[in-house]
Amino acid sequence: MKKLMSVSIILIAFFLFSCSHGVKKNVTSITASEATVDADWSPEDVQKVRNYMVDSISNAKFISSMKYRTEKPRWMLAKELRNDTDEHINTRVIMERIRTKLINDGTAIFIDDEALDTALKQLELQQSDLFNNEKAAKVGKFIGAKLILRGAISNIRKRSERTDINYYNITLQVVDLETLQILWTDEYEIGRKAEKKKFR
């Protein structure tokens, strides 16, 4: 009886394993340009903004200065681009794409702004009697940011009976947190036009 139960369990486990690995997922891959279907903000626009802004920041005068190369200051990302458009745009994605490229290119070192609150709560907890203070993380080990990357996105939309025209303007700045001096700023414009479909 025990032998029969063992064989049954093995067969069931084999069947479940086979089923889980035999499922085919129907995933369709599309390009950023294929995702652009109207005059609204699109993944293609995110790519264009990221490429332009990263190139502009990388060629900024303060990046090549002796002070920047010597101090290697940490950057912090603004929570998000201020959204002054008439659309819901996940502006955090734009900033994170720019940050990722700047880090991977070796242009900037960023502090994780989203982890800061979590880290502070964890440190406070570790300083309590619940933890061994000798093995707890030490307070005062954070490295402060010297620069912040911030900006805004706005748009002007013009609609007619036949067309929907949308002009986007994205402006970014790198600000010195000690002096509030703007070390770099640039803007990028995107014009989008969509023909309205005729219904009979």
Image (cartoon, rainbow, N blue to C red):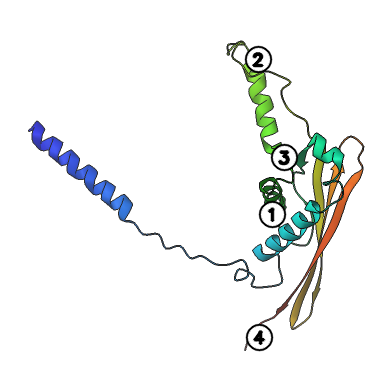
Between label 4 and label 2, give the one nearer the viewer.
2
Label 1: state its secondary structure: loop
Earlier residue among tags 1 and 2? 1
Earlier residue among tags 4 and 3? 3
Residue 180 in the image, given as x and y percentages of width and height: 91, 40
Along the horizontal axis of the image, is 132 left or right of 116?
left
Identify the residue under disc 3. Answer: 110
- Is 35 above or below relative to 174? below
Earlier residue among tags 4 and 2? 2
Residue 107 in the image, given as x and y percentages of width and height: 74, 46
Q: Can residue 88 be seen from the camera position used here?
A: no
Q: Residue furthest bottom?
A: 200
Label 4: state its secondary structure: loop
Identify the residue under disc 4. Answer: 198
- The label on residue 90 is 1
Between label 1 and label 4, give the one nearer the viewer.
1
| Residue type at the position of mark 4 | Lys
What residue is rendered at 68% in x and 61% in y?
47
Residue in front for this viewpoint, 102 or 172: 102
Between label 3 and label 2, give the one nearer the viewer.
3
Circles 1, 3 touching at the beta carbon (< 8 Å): no
Q: CA distance from mark 1 to mark 2?
A: 37 Å
What residue is rendered at 28% in x and 47% in y?
17
From the image, which quarter does the N terminus lie in?
Answer: top left
- The label on residue 127 is 2
Q: CA distance from mark 3 to mark 2?
A: 27 Å
